Image: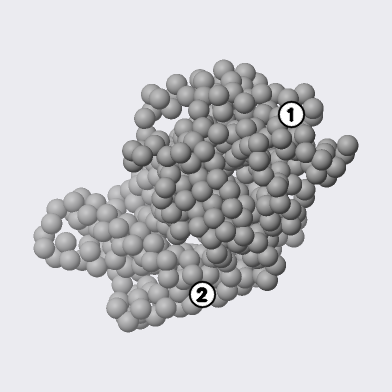
Amino acid sequence: MDIFLQQIINGLVQGSVYALVALGYTMVYGILGLINFAHGEVVMVGAMVALTSLQVLLGLAVAPVLAILVSLFVAIVACMALGYTIERVAYRPLRNAPRLAPLITAIGVSIVLQTLAMMIWGREYHAFPQPFANSLHAVGGAIITDVQLGIVIVALLMMSGLMLLIHRSRFGRAMRAVAENPSAAALMGVDINRVISATFMLGSALAAVAGFMVSANYGIVHYYMGFMLGLKAFTAAVLGGIGNLRGAMLGGVMLGLIESLGAGYIGDLSGGFFGSNYQDVFAFFVLIAVLVFRPTGLLGERVAERA
Amino acid sequence: MSPTKFSSILEVHDLKVSYGGIHALKGIDLHINTGELVALIGSNGAGKTTTLKALAGLIHCTVGKLHYEGKSLHHIPSHRRVSAGMALVPEGRGIFARLSVAENLQMGAYIRSDVKQINADLERMYELFPRLAERRTQLAGTLSGGEQQMVAIARALMSRPKLLMLDEPSMGLAPMMVTKIFETIREISAQGVSILLVEQNAKLALEISQRGYVLESGKITLLGDANELLGSDAIQRAYLGA
């Protein structure tokens, strides 16, 4: 088996998930200058809702394909409602408060969501239903599963769709305008609050899909799963340049690859001293390195603005 | 009077605005007749920009009455004032630097949904400002100051305003460009759009206006026919350096 190629595949799969979640961080940052630290929990809620929905539908003997599609849809709708509510309750009242205040409410929302999820779904790990045999495909000495292939394809489709929406639609134009200059956007007749709500809902929809993806890939869900995933996706967003959509996608994929290659080779490189259980450390090494050497991130440069 | 026709499109009565204890506007009265071009002049810090911001709904007035087309603007947010036909070209232009010139103009038409008419208006803007036609795909942030001012004015016109408010359109521009911008304002006025022109350059503003108001430290101190104001001793001394 080709270890290198295998790690690349694993990295691309994980990176696709990071990219989708990182987009949520970066969109909200772009429009409000705020890090929505509760975003990781939205991913978790998406996974949990999908879990319950799948269990119920499969229990009713609904056709697997239909069950998956409906569950994905239910998770998306639930997360959009959640994203809308988070903004309304935790951030909007603090729109003009010092920047520390919404950061604290973000952490508060995060804890509340985790606790609620723990109360609803319990502390235990749940097996995520796999209604299909997850067949394996050989790719030049490495292996990719159906689920992994699905993750990469769906992520690509969603990201292309998002880019089209943001760069070609009237709503996307309004979103970019609000991100750049909210009061000028209001002078164009844009209802800023609606655009902000829509941004949160859009990011949350991507988070729901990402939650479904990780659950299907690893086969387990847990009320705590959003925390680390959220932190890493945030790292990915910073790596690419927070506020920059292309940066979030690039950062996500790169972080997935760095982690995967790092975990694959750290044992050899450190003479067996570190094992692949140090995988999580890489993300934060990357975060520190970016903050030290290139705080604006890889693509975080802005167009010069002339007065 | 029929319900759609008003002799004055905007009426401001006793407008007061204060920021943290400082009274920026101390009770202003002014009105703009439909189709009129009115200048609001005054030196730096007189409260000109504050007046426009209050009219556009960007800041809240503590006291006073604002009536647009006979209806109160009390509690009407900025974006709804735009839908009602008010457009502000803000101080410093407020263009979207990271959007292309064409996208900036399309943002101006955000409240409209008549795609064909919007595209026709876009072409009209490119005729009005041929410089923008050449640069339509360029990011607006890369344009010169004068070109950005054109974008700001064209963008405001894209909403098909009934009342256009301009905040210091001559600021920071080369004299040639100022002449061009003021010619354009006159043309827009000739097409029947009511205009409130806020300027520090009193002579230039009064020359194209029908009436004028002089604002000094938050109060209207002088008002009247633009030509009379131009000739008045007070204006000559205070603003025209004669």
Question: Which one is in front, B116 or A254?
Answer: B116
Residue at 71% from the left image edge and 43% from the top image edge: B41
Q: Residues within 10 Å of mark 1 (few under 14, many from 20)?
A: some
Mark 1 residue type: Val
Which residue occupies the extreme left position in the image?
A61
Disc 2 + disc 1, Cβ < 8 Å: no
Mark 1 element type: helix
Residue at 51% from the left image edge and 20% from the top image edge: B123
Mark 2 residue type: Thr
In the rendered image, residue B31, in percent from the top left (x then y), is placed at: 55, 45
In the rendered image, residue B3, in percent from the top left (x then y), is placed at: 34, 41
Q: Is residue B241 above or below residue B81?
A: above
Residue at 74% from the left image edge and 57% from the top image edge: B217
Question: Which one is in front, B164 or B110?
Answer: B164
Q: How many marks?
A: 2
Residue A301's quadrant in the figure?
A: top right
What colour-coding does the image apply?
Answer: one colour
Question: Which one is in front, A97 or B151?
Answer: B151
Which chain does tag 2 point to? Answer: A
In the rendered image, residue A250, in percent from the top left (x then y), is placed at: 56, 46
Same chain, labels 2 and 1: no
> What residue sits right under mark 1 in the picture?
B178
